[in-house]
Image (spheres, rainbow, N blue to C red):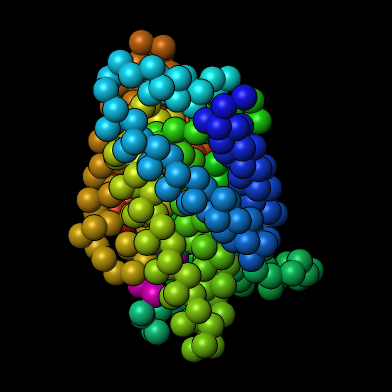
Amino acid sequence: MNMNTMNTRSMSASIQQAIFENNEGTRLVRQCEYDAAVKSFTVVLEILKPLAVIVEEQKHKQNARYMYDDAGNDSADASTEHSAPLTISFTNKSMDTECSCDDDSNDMNDDNKTTTTPSSCCTSSSSSSPSASRTASASSTEHSTKRKLKHFVFRDPVIIPTESIPSASSASLSKFLMIVMYNLALTLHLHALSSSRVSSSHKKKQVKKLFVRSRQLYELALKMHLELEDDIDPLFTLALTNNLGLIYRTMNEKVRSKICFQNMFSTMMYLLDSSQHEDTSTPQSIHMDIWDGLLSNAMNILHKHTYEVAAAAA
């Protein structure tokens, strides 16, 4: 057994460990255990980053050899042997509302924003009298047109099917890193949303840091996504663009937010046009609830005034 084969097998074992840690992190996200999920995804990054450096060094060495050098061909074969495509998969395929707080898309720097009613994950269940319920409902209706409409946040992290055995190649590791960047960004995003109802100034600073870190990771994942040459799940593209656009909006970067949703809307129209021959209202790979949520975001943000007038009239 030559050294190249030994190195490849060692790297493959590390990649398999990284896949396990990533999928464990996705489970923790779905259970709203955000701190633990952050730790899992951080472990994945710690495994992948040194591997990416080694692969990049090997790539440069191979490029320096002659194209038909036997040693170079053997090394290339060893890196792809017994490999399978690194695929993207979402578990829920629908809106996850069990442990999520809605994104009200208010500017995080606005201290005078209207307080919205927390969702079920932010409050404990309690009984109330019918009159109190009617009063709360009336109050909610009265203020619904005074606050900004809530927006759909894509909450499903990316899992990597266990049958995926990615090769220890630069492209494969880049795709894996992109997935983990997205998962970590999503975790921080959801963590910030679940903590955003707290009014203390210290907590607000922590929430702002979470949003900033989430934005940076979404941006990096998007940059890596655009550099990949192979096909990507269209749902991943929409999820990444949607959530980054919402982060920009929350941080009052309205121009960048609009660009994100313009790109997302264009992608959705392309997918819809491509699926017309199948006589479906949405691409079959995307759940109807998700499609409606994403389309609602695009219409609300790109055509805000028309959308809000129609919603108020309804």
103, 91: nearer the viewer: 91
Residue 128 is one of the magenta-drawn residues: no
User: Total marks drawn?
Assistant: 0
Residue appearing at x 38%, y 61% in the figure: 215
Q: Position of residue 79 (x, y in %)?
A: 49, 26
The image quadrant that residue 130 belongs to is: bottom right
- The residue range painted magenta reads 104-108
The image quadrant that residue 250 belongs to is: bottom left
State which quarter of the image contains the N terminus.
top right
Q: Is residue 214 above or below residue 5?
A: below
Residue appearing at x 69%, y 70% in the figure: 123
In the image: residue 101, left or right of residue 248: right
User: Is residue 23 visible to us here?
Assistant: no
- Report the residue that reaches farthest toward the top: 277
Q: Position of residue 191 (x, y in %)?
A: 56, 65
The image quadrant that residue 7 belongs to is: top right
* Magenta stretch: helix, strand or loop mostly: loop
Q: Position of residue 103 (x, y in %)?
A: 47, 61
286, 23: nearer the viewer: 23
User: Is residue 167 visible to us here?
Assistant: yes
Residue appearing at x 49%, y 89% in the figure: 201
Q: Position of residue 133 (x, y in %)?
A: 67, 68
In the image: residue 62, left or right of residue 120: left
Q: Is residue 28 above or below residue 9?
A: below
In the image: residue 129, left or right of residue 224: right
- Report the residue that reaches farthest toward the right: 127
- Report the residue that reaches farthest toward the bottom: 201
Q: Is residue 127 above or below residue 111?
A: above
Residue appearing at x 32%, y 62% in the figure: 248
